[in-house]
């Protein structure tokens, strides 16, 4: 029983998606159309990226890059800028959750050794905002972008052009907040970790670079998604099959259950018409609002079923990752990491997180309307 409770607590979105899919199957009896609900391209690319990032994490590639950059800073503000910048820029390519899983624990260690534990909350909250906002620039940045990009048939350049004003504004806001809330004080950093890699590890790094290139080529629609997935899985089976245990497969199943639930909703004419009229009133506003309660990935899948204005949904679900703690599920990663710290103050973290997120959200929504 405890195991089941723990699973439900850790995978609440997956469980809710399963219940919705299950209940909707009583309204629309399972048939062959169920197979057409699922976006196999998105799931294939998502799996390729998750496997690739798991390989890089296993080899501490991102952490090594982070330590190298941080070691060159001599002030608290400089270190914080690097840590926040790492989350912002790396999330564009390694996804927001991987960026936070990599750099938040590293930030905690760095600030602890510097004797700056009082800056845990400010730095981690800004890192979380940075990861959620940096990830919006590219289809690779987060799951909802990957899904909406596949659905839209936009070119990679068109997607970047759509989101670049928000990314630039976000970067400026992050700089302003860092300069306001983090003082410029001299600090002494730990010695850099020495990474000793044997020939096998070096070959694996090259293999994962190749896997990442394959994923990008698939995203750019140069290579069919099924060929890309086969290539990545076969490479891992041949050279590092243990990494196939690492990805968060619950995300894949969450997508599948949501696809089934929303596919069934579309087959109920009265409900489908009502949702379509509601969402088309204001795709950006509705997707931002929904994201606050169900997070931006389910909001993207739900809204996309009832409007053809995918560009508005891309903007709305990305901005919708700001706000509440569950607006972007990646935000929970940072919160959990912070709560593991001795003497953590979850209430203060929650208050700071909410305040900063609301400020960023209001400013970026204002930008969208002008």
Image (spheres, grey):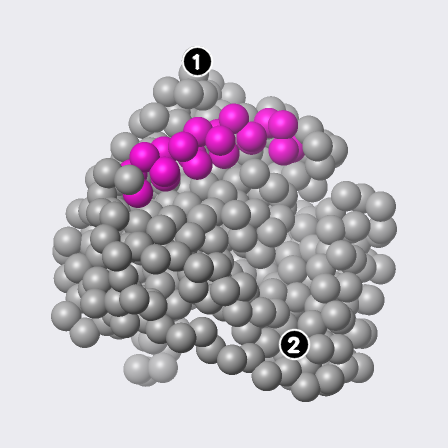
Q: Quadrant of residue 192?
A: bottom left
Check the picture and name the quadrant holding the N terminus: bottom left
Residue 133 sits above or below residue 17 on the image: above
Q: Residue at x 56, y 31 (%)?
A: 163
Q: Is residue 362 left or right of residue 223?
A: left
Q: Is residue 260 left or right of residue 226?
A: left
Front residue of 72 and 304: 72
Check the picture and name the quadrant holding the C terminus: top left
Is disc 1 placed on a helix, strand or loop? loop
Query: Closer to us: mark 2 or mark 1?
Result: 1
Q: Which mark is residue 157?
A: none
Q: Is residue 218 left or right of residue 187?
A: right
**Magenta stretch: helix, strand or loop mostly:** helix
What segment is highlighted magenta in the picture?
159-178
> Could you tell me if residue 304 is visible in this image?
yes
Residue on which the image places disc 1: 370
Q: Quadrant of residue 367?
A: top left
Mark 2 to mark 1 CA distance (whole Å): 46 Å
> Could you tell me if residue 275 is visible in this image?
no
Is disc 2 placed on a helix, strand or loop? helix
Asked if residue 171 is among those painted magenta in the image, a careful observer would answer yes
Task: Please tell me how crowded label 1 is: few (under 14), some (14-19), or many (20+) other residues with Cα within 10 Å.
Answer: few
Q: Residue at x 18, y 66 (%)?
A: 344
Q: Earlier in the sequence, mark 2 or mark 1?
A: 2
Residue on which the image places disc 2: 244
């Amino acid at each position: 029983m405890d195991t089941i409770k723990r699973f439900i607590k850790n995978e609440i979105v997956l469980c809710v998606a399963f219940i919705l899919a299950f209940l909707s199957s009583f309204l629309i009896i399972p048939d062959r159309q169920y197979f057409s609900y699922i976006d196999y391209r998105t799931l294939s690319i998502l799996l390729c990226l998750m496997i690739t990032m798991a390989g890089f994490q296993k080899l501490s590639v991102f952490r090594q890059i982070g330590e190298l950059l941080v070691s060159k800073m001599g002030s608290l503000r400089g270190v914080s800028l690097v840590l926040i910048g790492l989350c912002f820029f790396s999330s564009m390519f390694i996804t927001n959750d991987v960026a936070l899983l990599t750099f938040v624990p590293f930030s905690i260690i760095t600030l602890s050794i510097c004797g700056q534990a009082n800056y845990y909350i400010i730095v981690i909250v800004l890192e979380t905002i940075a990861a959620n906002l940096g990830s919006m620039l590219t289809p690779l940045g987060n799951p909802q972008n990957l899904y909406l990009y596949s659905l839209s048939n936009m070119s990679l350049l068109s997607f970047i052009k759509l989101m670049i004003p928000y990314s630039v504004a976000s970067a400026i806001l992050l700089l302003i907040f860092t300069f306001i809330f983090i003082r410029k004080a001299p600090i002494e950093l730990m010695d850099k970790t020495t990474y000793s890699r044997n020939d096998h590890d070096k070959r694996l790094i090259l293999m994962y670079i190749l896997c990442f290139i394959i994923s990008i080529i698939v995203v750019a629609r140069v290579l069919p998604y099924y060929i890309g997935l086969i290539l990545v899985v076969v490479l891992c089976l041949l050279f590092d099959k243990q990494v196939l245990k690492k990805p968060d497969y619950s995300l894949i199943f969450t997508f599948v259950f949501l696809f089934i639930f929303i596919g069934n909703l579309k087959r109920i004419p009265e409900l489908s018409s009502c949702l379509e009229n509601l969402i088309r009133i204001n795709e950006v506003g509705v997707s931002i609002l929904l994201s606050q309660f169900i997070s931006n990935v389910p909001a993207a899948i739900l809204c996309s079923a009832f409007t053809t204005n995918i560009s508005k949904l891309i903007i709305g679900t990305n901005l919708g990752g700001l706000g509440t703690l569950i607006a972007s599920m990646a935000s929970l990663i940072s919160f959990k990491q912070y709560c593991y710290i001795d003497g953590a103050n979850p209430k203060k973290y929650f208050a700071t997180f909410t305040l900063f997120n609301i400020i960023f959200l209001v400013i970026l929504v204002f930008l969208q309307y002008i």
